[in-house]
Amino acid sequence: MDTDILRKIGLTENEIKIYLNLLKTGSSTAYEIGKQTGIYRVHVYDKLEQLMDKGLVTHIYRGAKKYFQATHPSKIKQYLEDQKRKLEIQEQEVDSILPELEAMTKIPREDTFVEVFKGKEGLKYFLKDIIKAKQEVLITGIDDQKYQDALPIFMKQYFRDLRKNNIQERVITLKKRGVFLFEEELAPTTNYRFLEEKQFNPTNTFVYGNKVVIVTWGTPVTAVMIRNESIAETYRSHFEHLWNVASEELKMD
């Protein structure tokens, strides 16, 4: 079989080994998969999780044991369709920030530094940078649930460091039923205000010091960090305007 085809659609070498192994065996434990493929069990779990995210593997319990099994090969086409939809969403997200990014090209290049970070480690990098800066951070367009789901352990450490360094966070989020907010006990230096949907810009931005970070939740999640005093001040002024008109309470009509 030409497994290069599977590599071209985004599966890694170990994911392919595990997927093909499960197609042949029907169902196996992680231990059995590791033994049959020669992949260390700790890596087997990681790859199984990634395959489940792609919809190519499921699991069942037999007694206390967890067994994994490959879904029908037709799911590969469904995975490709999902990737197409994600790319379309990413394209829309990029379109939403293009005017802001294009405006930045008019600023002298020597005054502007841009870095791009991808994946969960990219999120961790700029959140750690916020702690290092030890300055108030202004956040708009945020969906706290995404950060909680992506970095459940790290977010506790992040809020611990905010408290330790007395760093204030001000967050403007969408006024809607069931919106996820970090609890005051975990994040006592974080203050929220709320905007109606017609007033709300969903672009997720962080402003602190002389930096602006724009986060897009595609696959993978991407953070664009812009270091420029003028740009940061523009975003800061816009934030203060929104903060003044935002509601302090989440009460719904």
Image (cartoon, grey):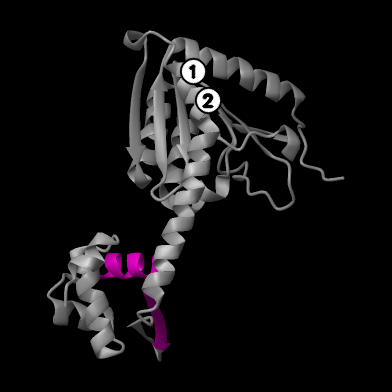
10 Å crowding of disc 2: few (<14), some (14-19), many (20+): few
Mark 1–mark 2 contact, CB under 8 Å?
Answer: yes
**Amino acid bearing label 1:** Ala
Residue at 16% in and 69% down: 40
The span picked out in magenta is 43-61
Figure quadrant of residue 236: top right
**Amino acid bearing label 2:** Pro
**Residue 249 among those drawn in magenta:** no
Residue at 60% in and 43% down: 185
Cα–Cα gap, marks 1 and 2: 6 Å
Q: Which mark is residue 137?
A: none
Q: Quadrant of the N terminus?
A: bottom left
Residue receiving disc 2: 99
The spot of residue 222 in percent (x, y) is: 40, 40
Q: Is residue 186 above or below residue 22?
A: above
Residue receiving disc 1: 103
Figure quadrant of residue 144: top right
Q: Is residue 192 left or right of residue 231?
A: right
Local SS, label 1 = helix
